[in-house]
Structures are given as structure tokens and as C-alpha cells.
């Protein structure tokens, strides 16, 4: 049976540095994973589009730097009060995200929307048609839009870089775990090897002490037997 030697816990500044490094690395991993979910996974899974607020027209509800996730929505489902993203010119990439303040329906069933920025005194100059609408703002996150701009502007190198960093982090953590396990095995093996001779020596000592005790116990018995024989012989001589 191997005797396990307890590992010496880290103390002092090493323990502090180890705890700080572990906390920072875990926090960084959680942040990067969360941003990846918000900026890439959710929009791709739902067909939504991440956008960044660049102007103050929607202050204070949607200040500059806010991330908007715009989800495609049927025109019939749009209601007054929704924040809608629409193309300034139909078919062009430039868009505006403003709030719907009124909806008008024509005799042929088509609908037009009047939109206005929360921070603007006047509504947008031209009514918005169904063909211009990209969708309704699903959710927003303050200040994350700056990260979205960085990701969209540097997608060719940033995403592979983040993936490489995550893979390197995983490889480092696995290597640390393997090295720590190997050190624990070496310590336990060394402890078992050092404990073996001591146990054998103690057992041999106990055996030697037991044999001495036995011999000491046998000596009086032999003495008594010799005493009995001599006394018998003495009686025989007297008789």
C-alpha cells in the first residue's frame, strides 16, 4: 500500500500571483466567449444584423456606441413605438434606426411609416416604405457597438486571432494540468519508496525484540527444570 505524501500548498506571493492569473484568464475567456455569442452566434442563428449607433439622434435611449441587433420582422407586425432600422435609399447600405411615431395604410393595403429620433425635434422628412425596412431592433447593449465596429472592420484578421488565442490558452491550461499531475505522481512515488525501507526496518526491529523476549522467557523455565533436577538428585543422595 502506497503512502501518499501531502502536497505543499502555495503560500505568500506565489499563491497571490497564481490566483490573480487564474482569475484574469478566466474572466478574459468568459468576456471573449460572451462577445462572440452576442456579436456572431446569435445574429447568425436568428438572421439578425448587428449595428452600431453612430449619432445622438436616439439619445438618451440609444446613445452613440450602443450595439443594436436588428431582427427581420414582417411589416404587418410593426407597431407604433417600435425602433425600426430602414435604408435611407432603398437598396443602399446606409441605414437609420428611429422610432415609429405613426403608421398609414393606403387603399391597396400598402403601409408607410413615419419615424422620428427620440432626440430630434422633427420627424424624418420622408415616409418610409416597406421595401426600405430592414427590421426591428431586437435588443441593444451600451458601448458594445464599438467592439462590433472593430470586429466588422477587422474581421479578416481579428476572428482568426481570437481563435488562435483561445486555442493557445487551452493548450497552456492542458499542459499545466499534465505537468502538475506528473509532479504529484513523482512525489507520491518518492514518498512510497522512502517509506518502504523504514517500514521493513521497523518490522525487523520488532521481530528481533520479540525473539529476545522469547529467549528471556525460556531461560527461567530451563533454570527451574535444572533446579528441580538438582533437588531431586540431592534428595536421592540424602536418601
Image: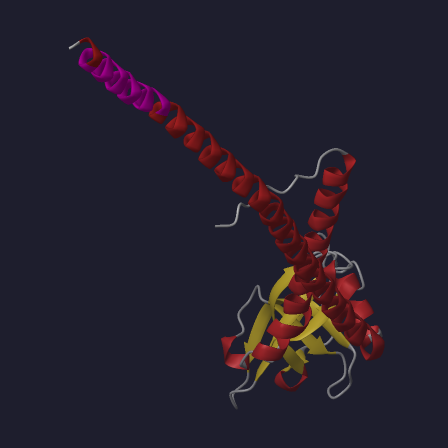
- What main secondary structure does the magenta stretch of the protein show? helix
Q: Position of residue 183 (x, y in %)?
A: 68, 53
Q: Quadrant of the C terminus?
A: top left
The quarter of the displayed image where residue 234 is located: top left
Q: Position of residue 222 (x, y in %)?
A: 32, 24
Residue at point 80% right, 68% down? 149
Q: Which residue appears at 53% of the width and 70% of the height?
A: 79
Q: Does the image show residue 5?
A: no
- The residue located at (57%, 73%) in the rendering is 103
- Relative to residue 222, is residue 77 depicted above or below? below
Residue 234 colored in magenta in the image: yes
Between 122 and 235, the residue placed more toward the observer is 235
- Relative to 104, 25 lies left or right: right
Whether residue 189 sits left or right of residue 202 in the image: it is right
- Residue lying furthest top in this view? 238
In this orientation, which residue lies closer to the viewer: 111 or 81?
A: 81
Q: Is residue 217 above or below residue 203?
A: above
Q: Tell which residue pokes out farthest to the bottom in this image.
A: 108
Residue at the image position 84 percent from the left and 74 percent from the top: 154
Magenta span contains residue 65: no
> Which residues are drawn in magenta?
219-236
Residue 66 position within the rendered picture, expressed as x and y whole percent measured from the top left = 73, 60
Amino acid at each position: 500500500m502506497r503512502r501518499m505524501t501531502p502536497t505543499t500548498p502555495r503560500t505568500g506571493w506565489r499563491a497571490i500571483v497564481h490566483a490573480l492569473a487564474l482569475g484574469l484568464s478566466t474572466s478574459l475567456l468568459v468576456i471573449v466567449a460572451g462577445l462572440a455569442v452576442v456579436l456572431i452566434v446569435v445574429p447568425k442563428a436568428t438572421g439578425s444584423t448587428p449595428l452600431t449607433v453612430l449619432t445622438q439622434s436616439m439619445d438618451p435611449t440609444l446613445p452613440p456606441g450602443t450595439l443594436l441587433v436588428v431582427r427581420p420582422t414582417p411589416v404587418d407586425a410593426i407597431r407604433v413605438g417600435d425602433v425600426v432600422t430602414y435604408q435611407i435609399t432603398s437598396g443602399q447600405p446606409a441605414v437609420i434606426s428611429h422610432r415609429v411615431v405613426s403608421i398609414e395604410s393606403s387603399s391597396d393595403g400598402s403601409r408607410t411609416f413615419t419615424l422620428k429620433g427620440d432626440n430630434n425635434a422633427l420627424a424624418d422628412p420622408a415616409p418610409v416604405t416597406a421595401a426600405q425596412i430592414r427590421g426591428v431592433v431586437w435588443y441593444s447593449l451600451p458601448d458594445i457597438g464599438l467592439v462590433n465596429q472593430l470586429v466588422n472592420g477587422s474581421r479578416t484578421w481579428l476572428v482568426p486571432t481570437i481563435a488562435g488565442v483561445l486555442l493557445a490558452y487551452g493548450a497552456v491550461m492542458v499542459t499545466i494540468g499534465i505537468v502538475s499531475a506528473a509532479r504529484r505522481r513523482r512525489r507520491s512515488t518518492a514518498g512510497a519508496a522512502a517509506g518502504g525501507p523504514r517500514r521493513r526496518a521497523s518490522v525487523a526491529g520488532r521481530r528481533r525484540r520479540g525473539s529476545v523476549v522469547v529467549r528471556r522467557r525460556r531461560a527461567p523455565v530451563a533454570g527451574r527444570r535444572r533446579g528441580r533436577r538438582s533437588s531431586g538428585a540431592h534428595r536421592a543422595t540424602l536418601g
